Image: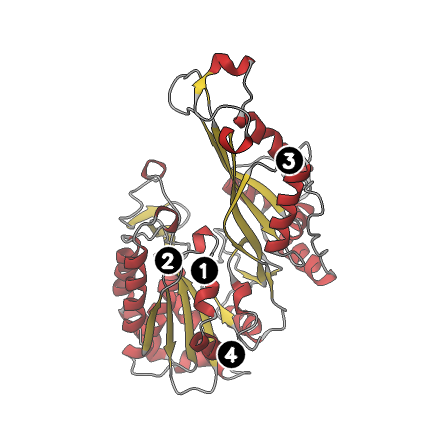
Amino acid sequence: MARCDKRMRTAAIYLALAMTVAIPGTNPARAANEFGDVRREIAARHDEAVKRLQDWIALPSIAAENLNSAEGAERMAQMLREAGFQKVTIVPTNGKPGVFATLDAGAQKTVGLYFMYDVKQFDPAEWTSPPLEARLVNKPGFGKVIVGRGAVNQKGPESAFLAALHAIRGAKRKLPVNLVLVAEGEEEIGSPHIGQIVHRPEVEVALRRCVGVFMPSASQDPDGVVTVSLGAKGVVELELVSSGEKWGRGPAKDIHSSLKAMVDSPAWHLIKALDTLVSKDGNTITIDNYPKPRPLSAEERAMIAEASKRRSEEKAKKQYSVRHWIDDLPWVQANERLESQPTVNIEGLVGGYTGPGGKTILPHRAVAKLDLRLVPDMRKDAAVAALKAHLKAHGFGDLEVNVTGGYDPTSTASSARLIQAQLAVLKRAGLDPVLWPRNAGSYPGYVFRRTSTT
């Protein structure tokens, strides 16, 4: 869901951010006034920008389903060309294609951008309106919104950025910074091939000229609080597979459930393995020799304490449909845990019959889909190695560990130029942002650490 009435303001904020990065010390409010012609273009092109987003939502690229990835890359490339990028290249990988683009405005400064054109899977039955129609809906408490898959994550924020570029061109202005953009189509499956895009020689050369890399995002809560995150947790996407064939025990095909009295169960084998990964309550990781997280710094604790004062615990619980935090922690401590702790989460469990009624089988195969969230000082490869060694040591070495994607966490100093520019712009736009140590979700910012200048 994306609010329509915020899209013009968001586009104007991206313009002011570009000005602040281009000329350190620039007053964003004065810069915005000086670009009144661009702001008028933003307003005049509002319907055009909304239609662009709606058309984009209507083309879902879902990496997990091998759906529309080539078409998604083509649409991404087309939109970048239309927004003024002079050089746009579709980059093949061993997975889904990426897009590399540059916009040379003849400026002294260059800023890097990360985009994604893929979205998560969806079940239309769970939506209040068809997820690919991107309908304009009046939603109580929000006003007029777009409801559609990708409206927030991430097509809406990216469309707002493109709208700013269209407005600048429409006003016959030049962007005050050059742009280098990398887009991928596999973010929602853990970005397994992002390195094949970013580490192409021509892409690395372009990124080295950047003062930093950022991702347009929807970072305003329903109550109006705007958050500036200094990084994101890393992630590992994987599945554990228990099968009679690989185990050498249990059946190699589904058999009648009465035979459980004399035949081992691969499903129970998987459940017992999962139980060794966490404490009895499921909240503390117990994997042997698992990487240790970095403790929160004094600055991070101060950020969390301030943000917890500004954010409503009651609204957060309502938004997430929960009544209690882990261990009934108070609001501040729950947020500290959110920011500091890695997780082992079960996304889904599949085994045997799951249709209506019962079916008396002993399934030969069971699968658990997991995601592991990582915080600073933890690395994806070390986490996977520890998991495999742990399973083997505890008698579950037969389980298949299929890693489908993932990457390390990222962390940016609050003093970084892009962060300070963003804070200044938001404040002068009448917003009072809170700093947040890291997004509890993930994005593959780690891949840019060796290529940009910050």
Q: Which residue does the numbered mark 4 point to in the structure image?
A: 208
| Residue 193 badge | 1
Find residue 210 and report its horizontal and vertical position in percent.
50, 78
Q: In this view, does 228 lie to the left or right of 164?
A: right
The span from disc 1 to disc 2 (Cα, nearest Å) is 8 Å
4 and 3 marks in contact (CB < 8 Å): no
Instruction: Please state which amino acid type lies under the numbered disc 1.
Output: His
178 is higher (above) or lower (below) than 124: below
Q: Give the spatial CA distance, label 3 vs label 1.
A: 31 Å
Q: Nearer the viewer, residue 263 or 319?
A: 263
The CA span between labels 2 and 4 is 25 Å
Between discs 2 and 4, the one toward the N terminus: 2
The residue nearer to you, when weighing 120 against 124, is 120
Kind of element beneath mark 1: loop
In the rendered structure, which amino acid carries the disc numbered 3? Answer: Gly
Write the residue at 43% across / 67% down.
197
Q: How far apart are marks 1 and 4 (CA)?
A: 20 Å
Residue with the mark numbered 3: 282
Amino acid carrying label 2: it is Lys
